[in-house]
Image: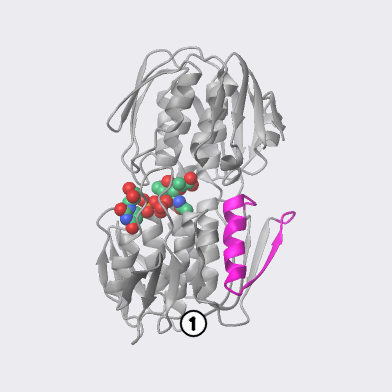
Amino acid sequence: MLKYVIKGPNKGAIGSVNIEGAKNSCLPLLASSILFQDSIELTNAPMVSDVLTMCNLLEVLGSKVIISEKKKSIKVINKNKHKLIVPYKLISTMRAGVLLMGALLGRYPKDKISCARPGGCSLGERPTNFSIDGFKHLGAQYNLKNGYTNLIAKNGLVGNTYKFPKVSVTGTSNMILASVFAKNTTTLRNVSREPEVLDLINFLNASANYKFIYFKGYRTIQINSIKKLTKGSHQIIGDRIEAFSYLCVGAITRGKVKVNNVNPKHLPKELEILKKMGCKIKIDNFSIGIDAKRKLKPVSIKSAPWPKFATDNLPILIAVLTTIDGKSKVEENVFSQRFQCVPELKRMVASIKIKKNTATIIGKKLLSAECICSDLRTAFAIILGAIAATGTSKIFRVYHSKRGYYQLPKKLKKLGINIKAIS
Ligand code: EPU
């Protein structure tokens, strides 16, 4: 099985990295293809395994999917009615498959939709109750049988008001997808404002040639019903999490790295924190440069929905903080198990103590170790630790990293990192 071997310490990473399109934009955009009678084309599409799994799911449902890795484009063509069963086999490997529930219900409300329930995941329990409650508010009936969520709105969906109990990215996108053709008007309160949700809204509005989905308040969206969607094309925004990951390669090696093809406005809190740590940050319209060639300072940070610090970036920052002299504090407020990188970084002698949802980190020099990845962002955190650690680290189960990072070893090598991918 593929593993990464990293020889460290790697110091002064230098160079630039081109960031892929955002995985977490591409997944709901692909799900939205179900709503279209003809086709959609996405450009700047990341060729990562989660995206390919979603393409597979669409094919299972009857869409034709044409992927060009060279052009970074995905075309989804709908000629026939979709199948309305989302099977367990594929959805069990990727939670974002639940977005197909909203899209199928939105397009075929009067037919029975069956979607296998996704399991928990390594980040903790990840329920879908907000989507289900929201669909019920639109008039759908729901039951759970043989592990499948069944949905039907015999009289069609009718717009209503739904308030999310907690900000949810997938919940918001799922409800948008379900509401597009629902009669009258739908109002969603306490919604996610993550750039990826805005990307979906922008795409749907542009495809309808009409701004039918819009913000009425800071966390309130109104959706005015439309009759149909025919064709759409869209360039996906750059991946802010991948961008932060490579900026942290600059930080942990005290180097100078530039990331291209990302909107700096999508990382407000992250850039503020890097500056607080003493890094010099230079931004352009679509690039960010980090200069960390200096002594860095410890920080305290809490994760929260956008525009605050992203939960996905927390393990990545933790890895950097393990190498910075002094005491840092990191508080996780979204998932129950975001600290899975901690036992792995501790193998590299990192000093981290966890109490409830807070990790206290005392910076020191890391030593190489053999480590196992348990989820996507943990994988990058471990890689960062190995980059800084003295000696040769071996990293196993790196398939987790492929879910969201395209050509990771190649991009790291370009920055001067001593990494080998060995099968
Ligand atoms: N929640 C519920 N019920 C729901 C939905 C969510 O209780 O029905 C809770 C969750 O348990 C969590 C919080 O609400 O405590 C927020 O979860 P959210 O729904 O926002 O997460 P998600 O949509 O499942 C997306 C990203 C994650 C990212 C989170 C938070 C995609 C495909 N995934 O997940 O990305 O961590 O938002 O920003 O967009 C990743 O890329 O590795 C990844 C895990």
155 horizontally vs 392: left or right: left
Q: Which of 278/10 is in front? A: 10
| Amino acid, disc 1 | Lys
Q: Is residue 152 above or below residue 306?
A: below
Visible residue check, residue 415: yes
Q: Which residue is mark 1?
A: 228
Q: Which of 214/360 is in front? A: 360
Quarter assignment of residue 180: bottom left
Quarter assignment of residue 416: top right
Identify the secondary structure beneath mark 1: loop
Q: Which residues are magenta?
A: 46-71
Residue name at image x 56 percent, y 42 percent: 400
Instruction: Check disc 1: other Cα within 10 Å, few if <14, some if 14-19, many if 20+.
Output: some
Q: Is residue 368 above or below residue 73?
A: above
Q: Position of residue 69 (x, y in %)?
A: 72, 55
Residue name at image x 72 percent, y 32 percent: 422
Residue name at image x 47 percent, y 15 percent: 349
133 horizontally vs 273: left or right: left
Q: Furthest-right residue in view? A: 70
Q: Is residue 92 above or below residue 76?
A: above
* Count of numbered marks: 1
The answer to whether the residue bearing label 1 lies less than 8 angstroms from the nearest atom of ligand 1 is: no
Q: Furthest-front residue in view? A: 146
Q: Quadrant of the N terminus?
A: top right
Q: Position of residue 411 (x, y in %)?
A: 67, 35
